[in-house]
Amino acid sequence: MENYSIVLLIMGLMIGLSAVANRIKIPYPILLVSAGIAIGFIPGMPEIAINPEVVFLLFLPPLLYDAAFNISIKQLRSNLATVATLAIPLVFLTTSAVAVVIHFLIPEMTWPLSFVLGAILSPPDAVAATGVTKGLGLSHRTLTILEGESLVNDASGLIAYRFAVAAIAGVGVGIWNMYLQFILVVAGGVFVGIVVGVILATFLRQIYGNSLIAISAMALAPFISYLLAEEFHVSGVLAVVVLGITLARYTNKLFPSQTKIQNKSFWDVIIFLLNGLVFILIGLEFPQVVNSISHQEILPLIGYSFLISFIMLVIRMVWMFGHSNNLRKATIQKKENPGKFRFSFYADENIDWKNSLIIGWSGMRGIVSLASALALPLTLSSGEAFPQRDVLIFMSVIVVLITLLVQGLSLPLLVRVLKVDEMKTAK
């Protein structure tokens, strides 16, 4: 009963701190993470272990589903090139860069272990991005790019993570086989999401007007879609995202106006509670991982974590400005040769340097990276302990905290300095 009391206390504190954050005009994730760290260091505080399976099942599906359901399909389609390039090639480039750096910094880190850390830290987090950027007055296009990237890049990062962990366990995967598995995992996740979406849409048409059943069915659907996809060893993340986008396309045909209002209110409360718990749990995990590392290693590992965070930020900034330059060139060529570029993959409008800077700066890491680190197995199939597990978890938590606190705290200031509120665009 004591643990339940602590959970209720944390939830009450989360609600109160969110109100304080709103009053003092700072992103509430920052205050909640800081509070979690402070609570974790209270003497006599019971250890609250985060089960990665709980995170992946109870947190990810509803958070991703809500973001996908509410994203602007029109904006997402017109910015597909930007979302795709950030969510797939940039994730794998970041994974490789982190692996190279950490391999040469820490001799004990073999290449497979280094790639595991790179895969854990490569995808920016949807919850962190939306939580920190909410209310900053960014354009709909910028928000769509950030949300769209975060919806897809989790799948890329988790796939790279699986391959790296398999390599450590001695399950070799050939390069061509890896590409084939990647395609199958992605295609399978999309297929599951579409199938569940069509089945649910058919069901909702049959009970049109019954708000209670409709909202209950939509609340259950993300979990079913995620579990079904994982059961078939395909991407549960993409299944949930595709489910949300599929239902959003037919929302006007599936619900009366009153049901849509009730459904939105229901999901607003659920997402608010889950978001708050996510960030407090990230903070609570910090004191526990500190205790798992010897005191002589703490400062060097923190230094390495700052270096990794800086490298990831630089790579993202360079990539974003390079992509913006490609957009500008493609737009010019399309105007000069409209027939030749009729089916161009690029959007018609450019991303100016201000929004490129903001998108580059918004690559915070969050609960997906933390859960991936904690999901590392304790032992290998041979019975040996998983090598460097505590170090991998420690550095993952430190990098998550650095990106949340440094980039998250400075992002509102950056937005104000750039005056992007003057560049709002219509949805």
Image (cartoon, grey):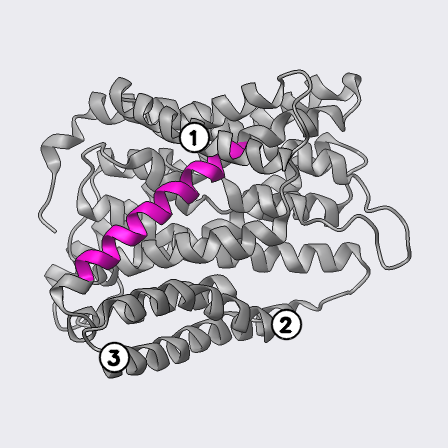
Element type at mark 3? loop
What kind of secondary structure does the magenta stretch mostly adopt?
A: helix
Q: Position of residue 401 (x, y in %)?
A: 52, 28
Chain-order first, disc 2 or disc 3? 2
Dots 1, 3 in contact, CB < 8 A? no
- Residue segment shown in magenta: 260-282
State which quadrant residue 382 falls in: bottom right
Tell me the CA gap for discs 1 and 3: 36 Å
Q: Which mark is residue 176?
A: 2
Q: For residue 170: magenta?
A: no
Closer to the camera, 244 or 18?
A: 18
Residues packed near mark 1 inside 10 Å, few (<14), some (14 to 19) or many (20 plus): few
Which residue: 50% across, 36% down? 312
Element type at mark 1? helix
Is 226 positioned to the left or the right of 168 in the image?
left
Q: Disc 3 residue type?
A: Ile
Residue indicated by mark 1: 12
Chain-order first, disc 1 or disc 3? 1
Which residue: 57% across, 69% down? 230
Element type at mark 2? helix
State which quadrant residue 298 falls in: top right
State which quadrant residue 411 falls in: top left
Which residue: 27% across, 18% down? 24
Mark 2, mark 3: which one is toward the viewer?
3
Q: Disc 1 residue type?
A: Gly
Residue indicated by mark 3: 207
